[in-house]
Image (cartoon, rainbow, N blue to C red):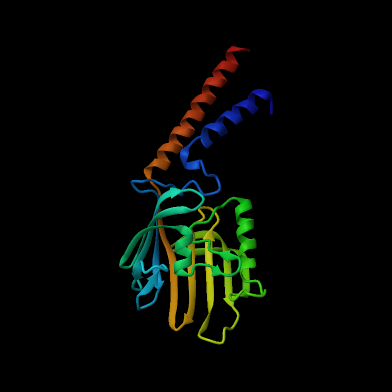
Amino acid sequence: MNSRNIVLVAIIIGLMQASPSAALMSYSPVIIGGTNGGTVITWNIADCPDVPFAWGWMGEGAWLASVGDEMSFTVLSVEDDVNGELTLGNMTLVTNDTTIARELVLGVWGLTQFFPGLVIETDTTSITELNETAHASAQRVKGNYLNGTMHSRIEEMTLGGSTYTCIVFDYEQDPTGYGEPQRTTLAYDLNTGVLVWANTSYSFGTPYILTLELSHIVVPQQLHLETIVAVGAAVTLLAVLVVFARRRR
């Protein structure tokens, strides 16, 4: 590749990365925040408790949903965490991805906490760190009351006619001597980072189970406009440079 082409490629990459939707490269560019509503992710509730379950430690309320309902999450901002508006049964509130994972038991509250939540970062480094954290959360070490067995794998999953290449985490807590140990499976699409399938359960007095299946992802028109502008600018620049190069021959 000659020096002129190297500069051209660098400029095109710079233009594409200048798009706000790609500013946080560790999250998929389809995960867009917006005060007027960003990306909306919806899951079908295939199983859930038939009694209210408390949300929060300070009496913030309780949620009650039914099998066949939908759970939705509207992204408001993407920072170190993904913040948004969650609607689950009778409850709607603004919260963050980690809090949702804790409250809905989408993870493991071990000495090393593993709460990937509804959306994960999709770059190689983040996936590697997430995998290491998952296994550390279940380690059989002193003081880890959620020790157990954690397995992870890459698997293709088909839901609603769509096929996703996922990283899947399977966790089973060791027998507790009381109630039923926690069993949790979480599958994340490696393209978008979105939770594709989840099944989590335990019993500590009141049985709890939650099964979610990804229904659809609605991306704001903003993404499409930004992509068109970025690609259009790159194509225009390429044409100008080609004409300029010909004139210099």
Q: Residue, x 60% and y 59% (percent of image)?
A: 130
Q: Which part of the image, by quadrant, shows the N terminus?
A: top right
Q: Please, is residue 204 above or below residue 159 in the view?
A: below
Percent x, y for residue 8? 60, 27
Residue farthest to the left, as pictured: 90
Q: Quadrant of residue 56?
A: bottom left
Direction from residue 237 to residue 132 in the image, left or right:
right
Instruction: Measuring from the top left, give residue 48's x and y in whole percent.
Output: 40, 74
Query: Is residue 53 among what the camera can see?
Result: yes
The image quadrant of residue 137 is bottom right
Q: Nearer the viewer, residue 203 or 212?
A: 203
Q: Position of residue 84 (x, y in %)?
A: 40, 54
**Residue in the picture at 49% in, 48% down:** 79
Report x, y in % for residue 100: 44, 63
The residue at the far bottom in this view is 177
- Is 241 rendered above or below residue 51? above
**The C terminus is located in which quarter?**
top right
Relative to 83, 68 lies left or right? left
In front: 158, or 143?
143
